Image (cartoon, rainbow, N blue to C red):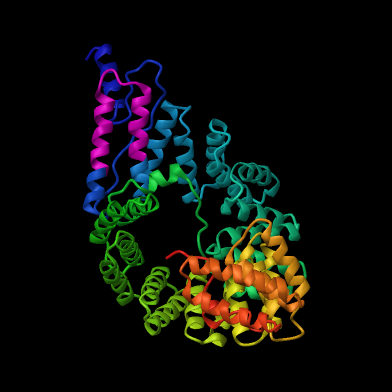
Amino acid sequence: MTRVGAWLLVLLASCSAVSCSTTPNRPALQPVTLPDLTSVDATVGAQIRERFQTLEQKRKASPTSDLDLANAYGSLGMLLHAAEFFDAALPCYLDAQALAPSDVRWPYYLGHLYKITGKVPEATDAFARALALKPDDVPTLVWLARLYLDQGKPNEAEPLLTKALSIQPRTVAALAALGNVQLAKRDYANAAARFEEALSVDPEAVSLHSPLASAYRALGRTADAEAHVKLWRNSDILFPDPLKQELDLLLESGLSYELRGVRALEAHDFPAAAAFLRKGVALTPGTTALGRSLRHKLGTALVLGGDTEGGIREFNEVVQRAPKDQFDESSAKAHYSLGLIMAARGQMAPAIDHLTSAVTYNPTYLEARLALADALRTNGRDEAALAHYRVAIDINPRAVEPRWGAAMALARLRRYKDARDALEEAIRLQPERQELSLALARLLAAAPDDRVRDGRRALMIVDQLFKTNKTTALGETMAMALAEVGDFGQSVGIQREIIQAAQKAGLAADVRRMTANLALYERRRPCRRPWEDNEALAAPLTRGS
């Protein structure tokens, strides 16, 4: 064999199926091979083989640009990554990055791949490269900061998180990470403030109760620390991350269809959501956590699309497959959904049963806890309702709804001083919520307890509210306050005006109540009932289903 023939044989041998480059200035590429696909779903295996064939075709085509080839390598890498074939995905990403060094996707996905395989220094370098290409990308800022924290480098993490929050101030993951930075730097007061803020944005971020408890303990707030330790559960803190979401959506799998269904739900495209979720249900056993989650979301899509009975069937499927005596988010949500439907139909006994099951499966489920408390209060069980409102306040101390509900339950129990204190604390936390100030004014104007009534303070509150809002409820409260301070002339005049307004609006029940109070004022007697029972049952805020 001639020397030329020998060199040709060597050259051909070095050109493996996916590693040879015929472009003179193209960087050297690593060989890519398919893993054993027998362990994956048939649809996923077919997807991977199809992308590998596409890469083969791109590699053999002449000419193929570096960018096109990079996309083919990266696309296969993403699919292998999503299917958890991490070793096989790595050379794909490295080749894509070598061919397209200015494409932020490849160092970004490399960062995630290295992170999930425990290669922290390599992950840090990869995310740093991604950030250099896209300096204002909030997900990259957060991921890189988290890695610095994992390596005990809070000073490197802090400016990244500060920048992320300057771009997106309500990013829970960034608030939580900044809290951990401040915890590491022993700045316990600011750490607690960051964790509190994160929980106020997302009460479901229950994993934050543990570091918040640590901050409280360091501040000497032992009781607060113990309360939050009890609320802790291990959970991920998710945040909007378009590139990672694209990775998660790749596979033709139950999880991928769930994610697509969620996207359609968020876009209010309920038929599309139901279609995606049905495909996921078909692929996923109902006895698994994912199977229950898919069925609950399918039920939600059906209800929102107008098929309530279809939704009930799906929710009942979840309930029947629920594990016994253990935390299960989907089972909690299915019971919550059924509880809301039963309550809307006036079927309070089954509603309370379902809502009780919801908080049993997830004790920190704030919406379910509030719905249960409201249902118990509606059913005249104020003491039981009060206990659940208090738990809801522990879950999220800044939430207005449980404090309002607790105040109404306390008023119905004739514990007017406690009701006043609950409203004052709620106003301190959220002074912009006018319905809270209105409720406090009414309590100050008409509470039967002499120690609680303060007509002049009630008038001050109402006068302030009148600057921005004029409603029959506000007018009625002003008439109560005027009667309490002895100005029955103005009280009668205002009460007559609001009765006329209520008559025009067709509010017959309100007219009857207002007419009874008018008769009191005309006899120069103040009102001593801040609310009728049906008024105290009505929640001022609307919660989602």
Front-lying residue, 42 or 495? 495
Residue 49: in magenta span: yes
Location of the C terminus by quadrant is bottom left
Place residue 167 in its image quadrant. top right
Q: Is residue 74 left or right of residue 170?
A: left
Q: Is residue 177 left or right of residue 115?
A: right
Q: Is residue 403 left or right of residue 96?
A: right
Q: Position of residue 229 (x, y in %)?
A: 62, 73
- Look at the picture and state if 294 lies above or below 490: above
Magenta range is 48-77
Residue at point 41%, 46% (across, down)? 245
Secondary structure, magenta segment, majority class: helix
Q: Is residue 318 left or right of residue 106?
A: left
Residue 225 visible to the viewer = no
Residue at point 33%, 36% (across, down)? 32
Q: Position of residue 188 (x, y in %)?
A: 74, 60
Residue 137: in magenta span: no
Residue at point 58%, 34% (across, down)? 135
Location of the N terminus by quadrant is top left
